[in-house]
Image (cartoon, coloured by chain):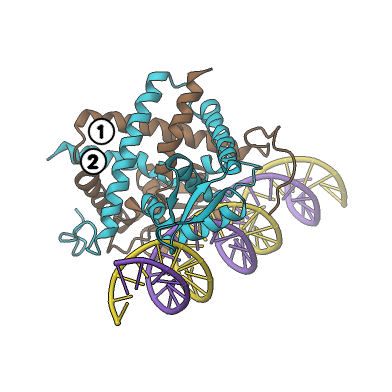
Chain colours: A cyan, B brown, C yellow, D purple
DNA sequence: TTATGGTTGGTTGTACCAACCAAAGGAATG
DNA sequence: CATTCCTTTGGTTGGTACAACCAACCATAA
């Protein structure tokens, strides 16, 4: 049988481990800073992607707009982002990071990068890091795309068909 | 400056994206099956790691024992695992997956692998997959280890030093 | 009128911490 | 020795926080 499938099967284990590391690790690599944890991702999106509307952010991150809405409210209250009404459509706000936001994000990123570099990947050589970066990017992009498609279809996800009942092996 | 640090810095973006994909994707790649979502990780640990005690599982996954306790209760109620008292220490239960649990897990894994293979990584060639697998494993291991150390130390995480002052909320 | 961007209310799942019980494992004491 | 504490450790349960979802809702566009 396709060993492609088998490779993917093997991949599940490390992938689960990695994805399972929710609030750990990187999330924790933050102490002070008045930047709320959950908002960081969004802020990053804004800093790197420039002025955006809320719905775009939601689409990018593949989360519900309500989630984005609340995170934005928080970020705004923290002074990390600013809104300005879209001149061409008064329903939408255009969002961008403030100076303060940019600084806070950068600080946070630096902390995380330091931790990664010193505590986690200290014995990785340069080429390995580059390789990882390249693959990780590709993977996360593909996952994101597939995820979007998946939620776009109210269809059943992975095609049941053989999942009728157990008849293990 | 050390380009190692810079590489790690670059790595943050794809890493965030990936870790941010909480309930999406893989988690969703499950429809029927009476196996609870959150328990899957634990069950997998049991199937692959053999009979274990609860505290070991918690340590492995780097989560609170209370979390494990509840997930185990759920899994037991679903008939996915069994407990038996440790003959040498009556405080502890030894846990192992039931046949049913093994089957359910395998089924779930197969679904995910299929989705990965067909919807996500379909255009990846074999060598790329292997490479990814290797790096991902190494990364997740290193992250896990570093995370354990991090929680082991009541110390401050990433060396505050410049983060004195207020922390409002 | 209907569709769309965004917000808010309500619910669920999952994590944490703290408090707790039960069993072990040592001392100190009879 | 055996017995009675005291501390430590494995595990569970209560309470709380947070992030995600869906549904219902305004305001504005088309």
Chain of the residue that carries numbered disc 1 in the rendered image: B
Where residue B102 appears, as percent x and y from the top left, is 30, 53
- Which of the labelled discs sits on residue B121, or is there none? 2
Q: Which of B88 and A64 is in front in this view?
A: A64
Mark 2 touches mark 1? (CB < 8 Å): yes
Drawn side of residue A38 relative to residue A7, left or right: right
Where residue A14 appears, as percent x and y from the top left, is 36, 39
Where residue C12 appears, as percent x and y from the top left, is 45, 68
Residue at figure coordinates x 61%, y 42% from the top left? A100
Residue at figure coordinates x 57%, y 45% from the top left? A98
Vertical arrangement, residue B99 with respect to residue B131, above or below: below
Task: Find numbered disc 2 in the image and state the secondary structure of the residue it sits on.
Answer: loop
Drawn side of residue B165 relative to residue A50, left or right: right
Vertical arrangement, residue B131 with respect to residue B90, above or below: above
Q: Check disc 2: other Cα within 10 Å, few if <14, some if 14-19, many if 20+.
A: many
Task: Find numbered disc 1 in the image and state the secondary structure of the residue it sits on.
Answer: helix
Drawn side of residue D13 relative to residue A7, left or right: right
Residue at figure coordinates x 48%, y 41% from the top left? A47
Q: Nearer the viewer, residue A11 or B19?
A: B19
Where residue B75 appears, as percent x and y from the top left, is 41, 60
Let me know if residue B87 appears in the view.
no
Please name the residue that numbered disc 1 is placed on.
B129
């Amino acid at each position: 049988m396709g060993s492609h499938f088998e490779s993917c099967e093997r991949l599940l284990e490390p992938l689960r481990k990695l994805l399972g590391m929710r609030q750990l690790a990187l999330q924790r690599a933050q102490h002070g800073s008045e930047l709320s944890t959950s908002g960081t991702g969004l802020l990053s999106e804004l800093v790197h992607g420039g002025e955006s509307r809320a719905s775009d952010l939601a689409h990018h991150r593949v989360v519900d707009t309500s989630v984005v809405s609340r995170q934005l409210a928080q970020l705004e209250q923290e002074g990390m982002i600013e809104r300005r009404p879209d001149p061409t459509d008064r329903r939408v706000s255009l969002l961008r990071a403030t100076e303060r936001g940019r600084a806070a994000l950068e600080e946070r990123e630096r902390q995380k990068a330091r931790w990664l570099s010193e505590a986690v990947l200290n014995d990785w050589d340069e080429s390995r890091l580059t390789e990882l970066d390249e693959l990780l990017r590709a993977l996360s992009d593909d996952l994101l795309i597939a995820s979007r498609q998946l939620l776009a279809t109210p269809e059943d996800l992975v095609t049941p068909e053989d999942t009728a009942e157990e008849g293990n092996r």
